[in-house]
Amino acid sequence: QVQLVESGGGLVQAGGSLRLSCAVSGRILSINRMGWYRQAPGKQRELVAWITNGGRTNYADSMKGRSTISRDNAKNTVYLQMNSLKPEDTAVYYCAAEAGRGWGTNGYWGQGTQVTVSS
């Protein structure tokens, strides 16, 4: 099993920045990729970004140029730096781990952290 605990969410004005953190524990060696997803009210959960063990990254088009996913292996922590935030970025942000069987129900998920961007 893998345990994920997010932190760093909160209320920020449009144009501001936030850094989310995800502390990872458990069977860390089983993880292929770490990612961040988000879910806004009334919408489906969507990918924000992921990063592989080798550091390769992928971003949703909506977050390209405004966010950076990174990992500190020594601290077993994954980060999501978000800049130039917009009200439409308001959502619950989830940290996720993928262990070779895809995301979704076969992946591991944190409890989520609320990000609210005011206009």
Image (cartoon, helix red, strand yellow):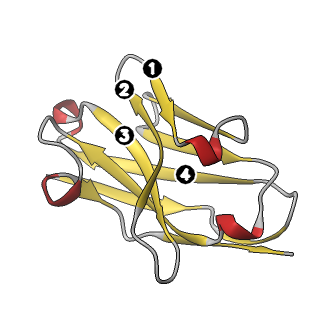
Whether pointer 2 and pointer 1 mark residues with C-beta atoms closer than 8 Å, the reply is yes
Residue 21's disc number: 4
Circle 2 Cα neighbour tier, 10 Å, few/some/many (<14 / 14–19 / ≥20):
some
Residue that badge 3 annotates: 34
* Amino acid beneath label 3: Met
Whether pointer 3 and pointer 4 mark residues with C-beta atoms closer than 8 Å, the reply is no
Q: CA distance from mark 4 to mark 1?
A: 17 Å
Return the disc, 3 or 4, that comes first in the chain's sequence.
Answer: 4
Q: Secondary structure at mark 2?
A: strand
Q: CA distance from mark 2 to mark 1?
A: 5 Å
Q: Is residue 69 left or right of residue 102?
A: right
Residue that badge 2 annotates: 52
* Amino acid beneath label 1: Gly
Q: Pick out the residue farthest to the bottom.
A: 42
Residue that badge 1 annotates: 55
* Amino acid beneath label 2: Thr
At a point 14% along the width and 34% down the height, the residue shown is: 100
